[in-house]
Image (spheres, rainbow, N blue to C red):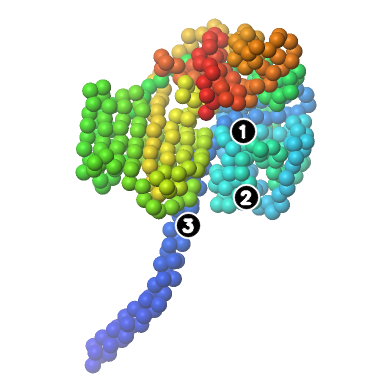
């Protein structure tokens, strides 16, 4: 009798539980789906945080021209601290206003930190990059510079590529010990000071350049492919990571020159690895599924990781929307930096480019390069780094022929030439001899000119700017 009662009770409980679970099935599915979306959101935010880094970072101490310092080798450490400030201040901000050009110009006379972004970015991307799922910046586009006042201004400024700026009201920026230490080091003569071209040459320009960069001691490096084409295990592991469970159905072709191609099906998916470090990936199976830009970026980040590319070594330099086979697609471009300097080559700065169509990576091409161990060359150790002004003086006739052909000599012609420059920056340039060369890069709206920073030799010129 007791056994029968227990059996009846258990069956009744199971029946009731079944009814309740059936009734709640949709809600439970939505509940767990919500958690899935939550964790996916965290992953997407982290992916953006890893790869979104400033191209240049300046500290302006005001009090006269020359009190400007560029942060190069410690750029990542400074950016990490600035992200924490931006996360806290923007995360709790509720008021935002727009600032015109005259308001932006006034910032030049203040003690500020200037963060130049690698490309004009949507506010949504910047929010994710500083660790916020969303923020008051989300509705803005074309943010290319962040200005953080080091005085009691009560705001943080986000300059727009189309002109003007957005001012987010804050509770004031906390005192930064690293900035005080930096100023002390500058006053002691241990840092390279930057001056405005306007003060040096009388040209209307906000560009900053150093007069005496002799404290910059960047060596030459020998480059290498980060992929050892002779390492069988490494090649197979990369292919297995990329194709996953489909690897058993992949055909492998080894070409005479050493390139390895892994082909799935009838060429629907192909991974090609070349001896010089170039990788090509194509996935023709574009689905009709649609994902947003951040999920697309996460797909690319995952594929880069599967290919063995360290997220700390590359950063995002462009993001745009396009169409592939009638579906929305996103294109992401990446570059490297070496000791805080951007890596440039004859192809520009976009060294890895990936496209996501549907919900998968459609294509990826790139150079996977590194530095030969213990292969730093101080071949010009007895020379100092030349200043950009010295290179300009030595090559002015060349620049005139390139940027102002046919114009008569004179002050107006000189101003026309110098005003064309949009960026003057110390970079590492990869030469045809596979050497990373410390170089000064002069960029106009549509061209780029690169000179060896020690010898002044012209390395490339007239190339399209990435």
Q: Which circle's residue, 3 or 2, is located before the other in the chain?
A: 3
Q: Nearer the viewer, mark 3 or mark 2?
A: 2
Q: Nearer the viewer, mark 1 or mark 2?
A: 2
Q: Left or right of 3: which side holds 14?
A: right
Q: Residue furthest front?
A: 406
Residue 436 can be seen in this image: yes
Figure disc tally: 3
Q: Circle 2 sits in a helix, a strand or a loop, which is it?
A: loop
* Crowdedness near tag 2: few (<14), some (14–19) or many (≥20) residues, C-alpha within 10 Å: few
Q: What's the residue at 54%, 26% (across, down)? A: 465
Q: CA distance from mark 1 to mark 3?
A: 31 Å
Q: CA distance from mark 3 to mark 2?
A: 22 Å
Q: On the image, numbered disc 3 is attached to which residue?
A: 38
Q: What's the residue at 33%, 46% (across, down)? A: 285
Q: On the image, numbered disc 1 is attached to which residue?
A: 116
Residue 265 rendering spot, x and y as whole percentages: 23, 43
Question: Which mark is drawn over residue 301?
Answer: none
């Amino acid at each position: 009798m007791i056994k029968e009662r227990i059996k009846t009770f258990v069956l009744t409980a199971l029946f009731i539980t079944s009814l309740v679970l059936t009734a709640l099935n949709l809600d439970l599915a939505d509940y767990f789906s919500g958690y899935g979306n939550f964790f996916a959101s965290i992953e997407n935010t982290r992916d953006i945080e890893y790869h979104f880094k400033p191209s240049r970072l300046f500290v302006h101490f005001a009090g006269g021209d020359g009190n400007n310092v560029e942060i190069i080798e410690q750029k990542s450490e400074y950016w990490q601290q600035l992200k924490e400030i931006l996360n806290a201040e923007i995360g709790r901000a509720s008021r935002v206003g727009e600032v015109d050009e005259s308001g932006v110009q006034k910032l030049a006379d203040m003690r500020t930190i200037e963060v130049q972004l690698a490309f004009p970015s949507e506010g949504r991307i910047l929010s994710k990059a500083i660790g916020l799922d969303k923020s008051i910046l989300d509705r803005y586009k074309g943010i290319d510079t962040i200005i953080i006042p080091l005085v009691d201004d009560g705001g943080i400024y986000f300059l727009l590529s189309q002109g003007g700026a957005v001012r987010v009201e804050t509770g004031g920026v906390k005192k930064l010990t690293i900035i005080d230490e930096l100023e002390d080091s500058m006053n002691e003569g241990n840092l390279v000071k930057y001056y405005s071209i306007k003060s040096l040459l009388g040209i209307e320009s906000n560009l900053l350049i150093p007069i005496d960069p002799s404290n910059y001691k960047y060596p030459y490096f020998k480059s290498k492919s980060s992929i050892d084409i002779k390492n069988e295990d490494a090649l197979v592991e990369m292919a297995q990571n990329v194709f996953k469970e489909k690897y058993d159905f992949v055909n492998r072709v080894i070409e005479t020159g050493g390139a390895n191609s892994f082909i799935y099906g009838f060429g629907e998916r192909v991974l090609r690895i070349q001896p010089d470090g170039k990788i090509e990936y194509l996935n023709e199976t574009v689905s009709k599924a649609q994902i947003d830009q951040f999920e697309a970026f996460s797909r690319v980040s995952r594929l880069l990781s599967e290919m063995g590319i360290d997220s700390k070594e590359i950063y995002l330099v462009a993001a745009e929307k396009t169409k592939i086979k009638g579906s929305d697609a996103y294109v992401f471009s990446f570059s490297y930096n070496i000791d805080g300097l951007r890596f440039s080559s004859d192809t520009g700065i976009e060294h890895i480019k990936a496209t996501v169509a549907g919900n998968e990576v459609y294509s990826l091409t790139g150079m996977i390069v590194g530095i030969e161990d213990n292969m730093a060359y101080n071949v010009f150790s007895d020379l100092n780094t030349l200043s950009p002004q010295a290179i300009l003086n030595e090559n002015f006739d060349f620049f005139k022929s390139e940027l102002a052909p046919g114009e008569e000599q004179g002050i107006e012609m000189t101003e026309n030439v110098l005003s064309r420059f949009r960026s003057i920056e110390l970079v590492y340039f990869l030469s045809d001899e596979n050497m990373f060369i410390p170089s000064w890069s002069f960029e106009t709206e549509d061209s780029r000119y690169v000179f060896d920073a020690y010898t002044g030799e012209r390395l490339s010129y007239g190339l399209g700017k990435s």
